[in-house]
Image (cartoon, grey):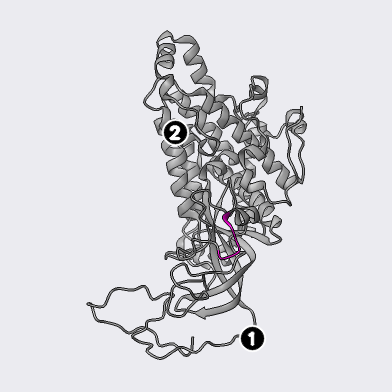
Amino acid sequence: MLNVNFCNCNDENIRPRNHHGIVCTKCNPALIQPLLVAEEIKAYRTWHFNIESGFVARNNGRIQGWNNFNTSPPPGFTVGSLHSSNQPWHPPAICVYNNHIAPDPYCSCGYYSVKNFGVISNQFSHDSTDEIATRFDSNILSSLKRLMSKKQQISFANLFFHSPLLKTLEIANFKILSEVSLKGKVIECEKGYRSEQIEPKKFFLLVNFFELNALSEQLGNFIDKDGAEAINSTIVWIDFLNNFLKGIINVYGCDFELLVNVDKNNPIDSETLNREEIKKRDVHSSNYLSFEKDLYINERLRGIADTVLISNKILKKQPFFDLDELTYFEKKYLESDTQAQFYQRTTAKHLRTLQNRDINLSRIVRQNRHYRAWGLDNFRKYQEKILSFGVLYLNIINNEIDYKEIIKSDFSEIFGFKYNLFLENYRSSEGFDPHTWFPLLIQNKTFPLLREKG
């Protein structure tokens, strides 16, 4: 803002304040006059996205995507109505501390956004790689290390290595960047803006390819997969994320683009090109490349992935395991071991069936790691949730999928696992209707109604 003095306070005795969005009253003793902006202001900000509930938080009614000063709905709105819209940007910003219209120059209220696209390495970072990697490590890799036997580790690692669906379901939460239009009252700050209203125009997911590929390599270490197979696993995963998020975002009437950061000194290029040649390549001139359109990704990285696929077909490799592998070893263990059956009976009262929202590999393993008898009911529900997510994904990318199509057709290439043995041995617990497992995500009226048939 042209009529605001930036803070020059150096007195160590002054209470420390964060001035990225708040006007310092000591350096601005006079009343600040607002500036009128005739045209639309374009900016950028992130929203927290949850695989199970979309842009809406599940805990304590808090609306994700607002800054910490916007935790309550404004007058005339209820938490229920905001959840039904699945649009945390829909209501105008309010201040929960003072009775004034948000944003206020002397307060910290309002929707926060920044001026520059693709900000990294600060509190307004737009790249989602660190969040995804952290959850991948805690929910998948750490859980694999806690499994009871080497056979179980190999079985689960195979499923996660080949299945983009399982990996996506387990990472659960990450941020999505959006280009936004600012409306109503707008205050320009040192790093961006605080506004009364905000409207997303286009969404982006920003990730670092080789950092995600390092996660695939760690999974591959459990099952002796080489670097080329890891790249194929990563490409398949990003493809899945791209298709899933594009379908979700289109429901909101916005475009979506997945952008990939490919480091200049990445592992595969540094092996074949010297440092000077890498610096000269125009393909690396931008930090983030279009996953769908960029030539480097589609020729170099997809070329490696396609070679793996062709090799598997020539060698007649069948990389996909059945969904029933999740409980196969444990069921065999319980059926054949009398002592295990004893443990199952004596510890049953300590093993509760997890609620649907708590069903994931990490919770199941943590709950049962102290007992030799595992909670098979929790694993069966986990299998249903996985297949339910597959049904939802197919519905999103193909508009409508009947449950009978899942039974009749083979979607192993898309899911990254087989499920014929699972369906043969299937005993319904919760069913795999996406409405049962993802009610907040699909309650938006533009999603086709899904109901289990037969």
Q: Identify residue for label 1.
A: 38
Q: Quadrant of the C terminus?
A: top right
Residue 27 percent across, percent down from the top left: 35, 87
The image shows residue 298 at horizontal and vertical percentages of 65, 54
Magenta: main secondary structure equals: loop
Asked whether residue 209 appears in the rendered view, the answer is no
Q: Is residue 245 above or below residue 371?
A: below
Mark 2 Cα-neighbour bin, 10 Å: few <14, some 14–19, many ≥20: many
The kind of secondary structure element at disc 1 is: loop
Looking at the rendering, the stretch of residues picked out in magenta corresponds to: 74-79
| Total tally of numbered discs in the picture | 2
Q: Label 1: few (<14), some or many (≥20) within 10 Å?
A: few
Please name the amino acid that badge 1 sits on: Ala
Q: Quadrant of residue 237?
A: top right
In the rendered image, the residue lying farthest to the left is: 13
**x%, y% of residue 354?**
50, 32
Q: Which residue is mark 2?
A: 144
Image depth: mark 2 or mark 1 in front: 1
Q: What SS does tag 2 mark?
A: helix
First along the sequence among labels 2 and 1: 1
Q: For the point 60% across and 35% down, which residue is it?
A: 386
Closer to us: 122 or 231: 122
As drawn, 58 above or below 365: below
The numbered disc on residue 285 is none
